[in-house]
Amino acid sequence: MAAQPGFDRRSLLRGGVAATAAGAIGLGAAGTANAAGTAAGTARSKSAARARAAEPRIYSTAEWGARPPSGDIVIENHVPTFIVVHHTAEPGNSEDYSLEHAKKICRDIQNFHMDGNGWSDSGQQFTNSRGGYRLEGRHRSLEVVRGGTQHVQGANVGNHNSEVIGIENEGLYTDVDVPQALWDSLVELVAWIAAQYGTDLQNIQGHRDFNSTECPGTVLYGRLQELRDAVGNALGLDAVEDILSWPLLKPGAVGPQVRAAQHLLRAKDFAVPVDGVFDTATRRAVAELADKHGIERHTCAATHHSKTDETGYLGSDIWPLITPSARAAGSDDVEEAVGTLLRKTRGKAPSVDALTETDWKRLLN
């Protein structure tokens, strides 16, 4: 269901509408959300959170006809830090909302991940269909989450798979919204997982918070704060403030963020123009930088239909490589980057001597 103009989902959720989702999964009355809450205010004991969340219906790998994994399933002897939201990036969003279609999507994903990517099983721990059906992805994921003390290692976030549990949401959400059924089932699934593990609300994140990828699509990514609010309401937790994130820059992008990135790349000795246009030379420089630092290119491709080349995208795993903590690093080009961003934000300059990661994120957003 697309958002209506002027419709502020977050305000509505904080006003109590998300209690409907809480009731649907047997969570009881949602706690009053506090818009001024901080991450520290979200910490409730795992046992208390778990008591408030009933397990939603999740179809097991056996129920959707999964192939046996080709290798061992790795069980991490700790809880995951993050719950990560993905989209399958499947073009032409299906209007088949049936359970059988949801099961077929899981088989298609597993076949691609095993036969196309050479993985031992589906990369994600769970799959959420456009019809609102939740299914287990990688074998044993459901069983292990029920235990609440360990998690199955997946293959859905490059360089972070020991820390995350991933949910693939069927569809492509770069410029259209998710169906209401998918949204409701996502809230219920994330609330249950968060309750099982005692996950902090700020650690409900998107794939692009870890890798330079479009995933989970600009529209769904833009609703992550709303998702945190809804899950917090469902679990009776205080709300967290909006989370600052690194922007995603793609080839073809224009503007001051691109110009600042070009200055920062020049400070790293890459010969790129400084014109605010993300051209071929800029993309090549970003790709070379990623290769130099061993950054894994992790496109969220669930099936062969959704394969997109995201080489050279500049996102959350690249910005830390080019944003120095000392203003003197890179000298003039770093100063020009800061100046460009200050003109964009009309903000005040951070400390002359130092720029923290938070400073850079505030400048870039």
Image (tube, rainbow, N blue to C red):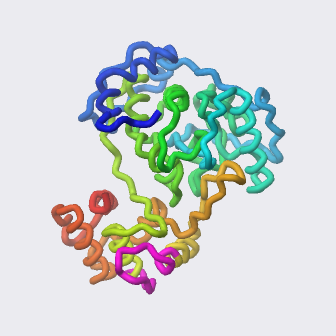
On the rendered structure, is 274 left or right of 96? Answer: left
On the rendered structure, is 340 left or right of 113? Answer: left
Residue 277 in the image: above or below residue 64: below
Residue 261, by quadrant, is: bottom left
Residue 252 in the image: above or below residue 128: below
Instruction: Name the spot of residue 163 as percent of width and height, x first.
Output: 55, 46
Does 282 appear in magenta?
yes
Does 98 appear in magenta?
no
Instruction: Name the spot of residue 210 as percent of width and height, x first.
Output: 50, 54
Q: Which residue shows up at 47% across the image and 16% down it?
A: 27
Q: Read off the magenta span.
A: 267-283
Instruction: Name the spot of residue 61 as percent of width and height, x first.
Output: 75, 32
Q: Which residue shows up at 34% across the image and 74% down it?
A: 259
Q: Which residue shows up at 54% across the image and 73% down it?
A: 287
Residue 19 in the image: above or below residue 121: above
Question: How many numbered discs, if any?
Answer: 0
Main SS type for the magenta part? loop
Q: Which residue shows up at 47% across the image and 17% down it?
A: 52
On the rendered structure, is 202 left or right of 179? Answer: left
Instruction: Name the spot of residue 303 as percent of width and height, x first.
Output: 70, 50
Quarter of the C terminus within the rendering: bottom left
